[in-house]
Image: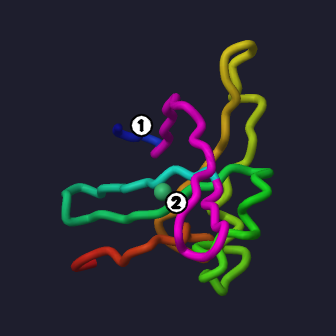
Amino acid sequence: MLTDDDGAYRFVTIKPGAYPWRNSYNAWRPAHIHFSLFGTGFAQRLITQMYFEGDPLIPHDSIIATIPDKPAADRLTAKLDLNASRPLECLAYRFDIVLRGRRQTLFENKLQGG
Ligand SMILES: [Fe+2]
């Protein structure tokens, strides 16, 4: 999908569920969505994950646990946005992705050639 002129985006999807994995005994990933962002070309790619506010598995996630910067880890959690929700249809979560600066979103990779 493309962002608009202000960099805003919106999409509708099914909220994913938690899933088990074999990282450790009885390990579960919290519900999350992987984001792959492209700049003006495919070589400008940034990757991150978004979690959902209130998910009790977030504090138990071994991926989140690898992030030493707690505020940066917290910014990976989308906040419930009732104003953007559609009555009797769907909830909405707000996930602002910040490309640069002090409040930059934590990315799993570095921009190539940048
Ligand atoms: Fe995943």
Asked whether the beta carbons under mark 1 and mark 2 sit within 8 Å of each other, the answer is: no
Q: Main secondary structure of the magenta part?
A: loop
Instruction: Give 108 or 101, whichever is nearer the viewer.
Output: 108
At x 61%, y 44%, the residue is: 17
Residue 67, above or below 89: below
At x 70%, y 26%, the residue is: 85
Image quarter in which the N terminus is found: top left
Amino acid of disc 2 = Gln
Where residue 49 is drawn, which disc sits there?
A: 2
Element carrying mark 1:
loop
Q: Alpha-carbon neighbours of circle 2 within 10 Å: few (<14), some, or many (≥20)?
A: some
Amino acid of disc 1 = Asp
Residue 57, above or below 2: below
Image quarter in which the C terminus is found: bottom left
Where residue 109 is drawn, which disc sits there?
A: none
Disc 1 to disc 2, C-alpha distance: 21 Å
Return the x and y of residue 83 as percentages of the image width and height. 76, 29
Q: What span is colored magenta in the figure?
A: 7-30
At x 29%, y 57%, the residue is: 39
Q: Residue 26, located in which quarter of the rendered image?
A: bottom right
Instruction: Give 35 or 102, whichever is nearer the viewer.
Output: 35
Query: According to the image, label 1 marks what residue?
Result: 4
